[in-house]
Image (spheres, rainbow, N blue to C red):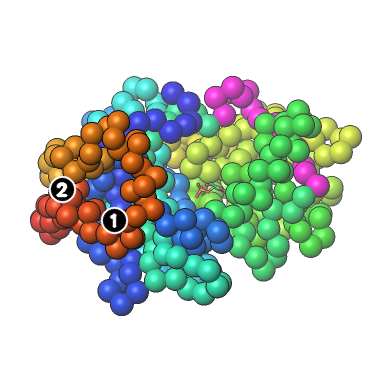
Amino acid sequence: LGFGIEPVNAHVRYTWKKGSGWDRGQIIPEPNINLHINSGVLHYGLAVFEGLKAFEGVDGSHNICNPYANAKRMKDGARRLMMPEVPEELFVSAVKDAVAVNRTCIPSYSSGGALYIRPLLFASGVMLPLKITDEFSLVVSVTPVGDYFSSSTNGVTAGVVDLDRCAPRGTGHVKAAGNYASDMYGLEMARKMGCDTSLYLDAKENAYIEEFSVANFVGVKDGCYVTPKTDSVLPSITNNMLMDLAKDAGMKVEHRAIHFENEIEQFTEIAGSGTAVVLSPVREIKKGSRVYQFGSLKLLDALKKRLVRIQRGEAIDTFGWMEKVPYGVAERARKAIEKPIPTRMPPTLLPPKKKMFENSKKLQNSMSFREKSKIFENSKIFENSKKFQNSRKARVSCL
Ligand SMILES: Cc1ncc(COP(=O)(O)O)c(C=O)c1O
């Protein structure tokens, strides 16, 4: 199992509307969404997302790793991008529903895989002037995953790129979708250097280590756990958990600025930390014509192993990170999608196929938007989706 999008049962969707706030949510048994072509997310990139994982434990239970931390980070992102905050309880319940309804897609304990969960908050409302719109959506999708860097088990290589990821007072500290758009070119530069991933230095002085493409920089120097402290990197939840584990193991933790040229050669271990990569060893960093090499993970590997054991229910979770997905939720969630909503117009409303083709131009020109909307409203789709929403309401209220 690699790291890609696989077909699953359903996703969870909540809508926020000006005046009424967040609705009661829906479970939607298909991966598509109907968006206005002028929605804010498409033109202005108004979106923040999260990434977290659910695991099958050694006892067969299903558990989500640290969802409240992701909920908090999404709130920070929403505030920075002027989007409505998703209350933490709503976020966690949406994530649990998404896992429950896709319980059959969670990789087995023995496979070593996980269910990757991707909550996304975005401006689904229409925007032309750069002004807050009246509709936002939260969608939570999932996909079963294995290793992120499947071809680099001995460690990855990183290239220091001549680009800035995020400005000091920009959006680097939140998971804004646009940060990743700007990293695409950096990743390509790294690949041209023969590297697996990009490493960024700070935008102001181009001297201090910021982070890898999708992971925080973590290193061991003189036996200490060292990781950069800057306002423009994403506060990695994995890194925070590893810092807690390091302290718990009696290791000194230094969360501080790291000068690349002055310090890089003194690191004995380097890794990238993140939900997707967990703690991936970095065996080589290239900067211009210089190549720096690092040993395999030892102290960091012990921390990684303890984290993975907690996630898989093999070690006691003394930190309270793991959130169980109870079974009742799954049964009710599955019932809610048993009757799929038809995604096409019922055939009775359509003229015969050939005629429809011949008349399509005529029809489009002669019908007003209002008339078209009326047909849609009168159709079974509308009735069914209302029925579906009501069943979801009943379901949510009994969770
Ligand atoms: C830029 C960036 N930094 C760090 C991380 C790691 O964060 P986390 O451990 O919360 O997944 C990610 C991962 O999603 C990321 O995209």
Q: x%, y% of residue 379? A: 18, 50
Q: Is residue 207 visible?
A: yes
Q: x%, y% of residue 59? A: 23, 31
What's the residue type where badge 2 is placed? Lys
Left or right of residue 226: residue 313: left
Q: Is mark 1 within 8 Å of ligand 1?
A: no
- Quadrant of the image occupied by residue 198: top right
- Quadrant of the image occupied by residue 232: bottom right
On residue 173, the disc is: none
Is 153 above or below relative to 162? Answer: above
**Magenta run includes residue 155:** yes
Query: Of label 2 and label 1, which has the lower sequence position?
Result: 1
Q: Which residue is mark 2?
A: 380
Q: Residue at x 89, y 34 (%)?
A: 289
Q: Which residue is mark 1?
A: 372
Distance (Cα) linking label 2 and label 1: 14 Å
Report the magenta stretch's main SS: loop
In terms of secondary structure, where does tag 2 sit? helix
Tell me where the magenta segment starts and ends, as one range: 149-162
Q: Residues within 10 Å of mark 1 (few under 14, many from 20)?
A: few
